[in-house]
Amino acid sequence: MGDDLGDEWWTHEGNTDVSEAEEETQQEKPPTEKSNTKTKSEKRKAVTERTVNAKKKKKNEQKECIIPQKKETEDEKSSKPKRKRKKKKTITDVLSTSEPKPGCPADLQNVVTQHFSDKLSVIEQEELKLLDSSFLTSNDLTHTLSSYLKQVCPKWSKIHKQHTEKSSVVLLIVCSSALRTIELIKQLTAFKGEAKALKLFAKHIKIEEQVKLLQKGVTHIGVGTPGRISALIEKEGLSLQALRYLVLDWNWRDQKLRRMVDVPEVKLDVMKLLESGILNHCKEDKVKIGLF
């Protein structure tokens, strides 16, 4: 039997088994390689997903860390007391808490020097200074306009009878507004007697009409605003030739507790009026100034 099958039949038999095993292994190998490739790709995907997730977590953690800080700062701001801005004190605030003081010649002199300090030289400023003899007695806040004028002009009845010049007045009363002008004219009744008083303000009255009224007859008292009075002097509608008394409505205050020199526009007009020739007349002892 050994010869029929060959001397090495057992070897071939073994080889056939080996070859069959190899074939089986060869057939089995491809799927294992595929499975290996699949696991690698899955691993790569898993790694990338992990890295992405890790980055997202870090971002979320950073956001979570930042948001509370903002909240804390906002909470701190809300908890901190807000600083109140200090309001600048106005003239009304100051005067409402203090007692009004009557004006005096030094007050007017200070206003004049402050106004012209940057406009005139030192020598010119010295020329603006007035002597005490240039002023009438100031109102001590106890007088009405009529009682004050009777005190400072005791010989008024004789003075106004001697006045015969047109386009001129003996007494000028300067105030801050048209309404105040009308009020002061009403207060003059007990003082003026037969003397004629004229309103000198710009509201509803043309300057040409006032010039005609001054030229038409003799006017003894002029009551008005400094702006209109200055304009009349410039146009030669009002002469200072017969002027003897200039009374400033110094102590009166408006609804905001401002005096006439506390209002910039009115103050500027007052300085312009004084500079128009009244200060020179005061130095020549022709005009005296009173603070009512």
Image (spheres, grey):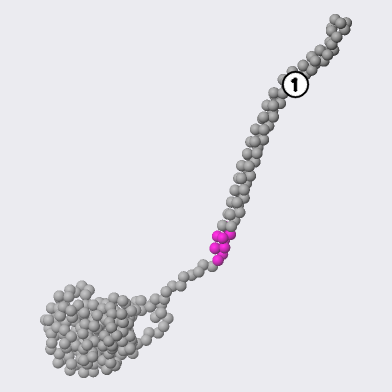
Q: How many marks?
A: 1
Magenta stretch in the rendered image = 71-80
Which residue appears at 79% of the width and 17% of the height? Answer: 18
Q: Main secondary structure of the magenta part?
A: helix
Q: Amino acid at mark 1?
A: Thr
Could you say which is closer to the camera, residue 119 or residue 276? 119
Could you say which is closer to the camera, residue 243 or residue 140? 243
Tell me if 1 is positioned left or right of 153 in this view: right
Task: Name the residue that disc number 1 marks.
Answer: 25
Can residue 137 be seen at all in this image of the molecule? yes
Q: Position of residue 277 (x, y in %)?
A: 21, 85
Tell me if 35 is positioned left or right of 182 in this view: right
Task: Locate residue 263: give its quadrant.
Answer: bottom left
Task: Locate residue 209: give its quadrant.
Answer: bottom left
Q: Quadrant of the N terminus?
A: top right
Q: Position of residue 15 (x, y in %)?
A: 80, 15
